[in-house]
């Protein structure tokens, strides 16, 4: 998975109090709704401990954007903000 190496790069490359923003889309199937936002949060905690979760924002995806083929099953996105808390 690419999230672990990306977390380490963000940790090394961000200035103190710098922010890393991830946008994670919801995956909807007919049987269940799964939001994968918890996976990158856990990976960032494990691979980049100096990046702390600062904020999570839930944003609904407008129907106009969902009409595009790639966004059909996406109804919400979570915007995850990590802050570099290195001393």
Image (cartoon, rainbow, N blue to C red):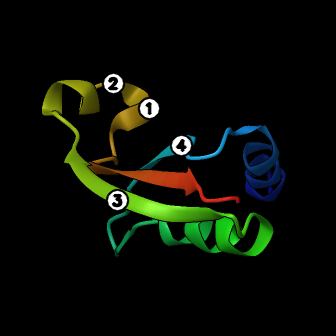
Task: Check if mark 4's residue and mark 3's residue have beta carbons within 8 Å.
Answer: no
Q: Position of residue 82 (x, y in %)?
A: 52, 54
Identify residue for label 3: 56
Q: Residue at x 79, y 59 (%)?
A: 4
Identify residue for label 1: 70
* 77 or 86: nearer the viewer: 86
Identify residue for label 4: 19
Q: In the rendered structure, which disc, 1 or 4, sits on the residue that comes first in sequence?
A: 4
Q: SS at mark 2?
A: loop
Closest to the camera, between mark 2 and mark 4, is 4
Q: Quadrant of the N terminus?
A: bottom right
Closest to the camera, between mark 4 and mark 3, is 4
- The span from disc 3 to disc 2 (Cα, nearest Å) is 25 Å
Q: Residue at x 73, y 44 (%)?
A: 10
Q: Residues within 10 Å of mark 4 (few under 14, many from 20)?
A: some
* 57 or 74: nearer the viewer: 57
Task: Check if mark 2's residue and mark 1's residue have beta carbons within 8 Å.
Answer: yes
Closest to the camera, between mark 3 and mark 2, is 3
- The span from disc 3 to disc 1 (Cα, nearest Å) is 23 Å
Q: Position of residue 6 (x, y in %)?
A: 77, 47
Q: Residue at x 50, y 72 (%)?
A: 38
Q: Residue at x 56, y 68 (%)?
A: 41
Q: In the rendered structure, which disc, 3 or 2, sits on the residue that comes first in sequence?
A: 3
Q: Is residue 61 visible?
A: yes
- The span from disc 4 to disc 3 (Cα, nearest Å) is 13 Å
Q: Quadrant of the C terminus?
A: bottom right
Q: Residues within 10 Å of mark 3 (few under 14, many from 20)?
A: some
Q: In the rendered structure, which disc, 3 or 1, sits on the residue that comes first in sequence?
A: 3
Identify residue for label 2: 68
In this rendering, the answer to whether 44 lies above or below 21 is below
Q: In the rendered structure, which disc, 2 or 4, sits on the residue that comes first in sequence?
A: 4
- The span from disc 2 to disc 4 (Cα, nearest Å) is 30 Å
């Amino acid at each position: 998975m690419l999230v672990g190496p990306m977390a380490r790069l963000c940790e090394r490359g961000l200035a103190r109090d710098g922010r890393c923003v991830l946008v994670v889309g919801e995956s909807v199937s007919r049987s269940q709704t799964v939001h994968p936002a918890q996976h990158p949060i856990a990976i960032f905690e494990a691979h980049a401990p100096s990046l702390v979760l600062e904020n999570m924002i839930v944003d609904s995806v407008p129907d106009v954007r969902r009409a595009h083929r790639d966004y059909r099953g996406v109804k919400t996105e979570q915007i995850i903000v990590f802050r570099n808390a290195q001393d």
